[in-house]
Image (cartoon, rainbow, N blue to C red):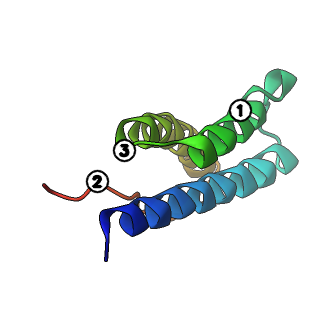
Amino acid sequence: MSRDKIFQVAKETTISNIVAIRENLTRCVDEGMVDLNAEYYNELLLLEDEGSLAQSWDELEEVITKAKTLEVDVAAWLANHGQTSISIPWPRPPVS
């Protein structure tokens, strides 16, 4: 698979992961989590846009790093309320 194709697949995977986090966040909010001014939700929407616009691995990795932080926050809330979530596998740049 070409490097460009690998990058495109990584972008698609990243966006899918962000959508999954957003769905978990919606579940959390429905169950009582406070998302003041929809900050988490808006950040996830922003990251989804940034991920789709990423033109390099550096840009995509920045989006992934921010998304992972939100993933941990949502997972922690779920864990504190007796629920579990599955850790999301994130893409990595190919080794040169």
Give the camera-side residue of 74 and 20: 20
Q: Are marks 3 and 2 in contact (CB under 8 Å)?
A: yes
Give the camera-side residue of 30 and 83: 30
Q: Are marks 1 and 3 in contact (CB under 8 Å)?
A: no
Gap in angstroms between the C-alphas marked 3 and 2 = 6 Å
Q: To which quarter of the image does residue 29 belong?
A: top right
Label 1: element kind: helix
Q: Position of residue 13 (x, y in %)?
A: 52, 63
Q: Amino acid at mark 3?
A: Trp
Q: To which quarter of the image does residue 42 belong?
A: top right
Q: Amino acid at mark 2?
A: Pro
| The N terminus, quarter of image | bottom left
What number is the disc on residue 40? 1
| The C terminus, quarter of image | bottom left
Q: Nearer the viewer, mark 1 or mark 3?
A: 3
The residue carrying pointer 3 sits among few (fewer than 14), some (14 to 19) or many (20 or more) residues within 10 Å by Cα, namely some
Q: Amino acid at mark 1?
A: Tyr
What number is the disc on residue 57? 3
The reply, left or right, for residue 27 in relation to residue 71 is right
Whichever of callouts 3 and 2 sits on the residue coming sooner in the sequence is: 3
Gap in angstroms between the C-alphas marked 1 and 2 = 26 Å
| Pointer 2 residue | 93
Label 2: element kind: loop
Furthest toward the left, the residue is 96
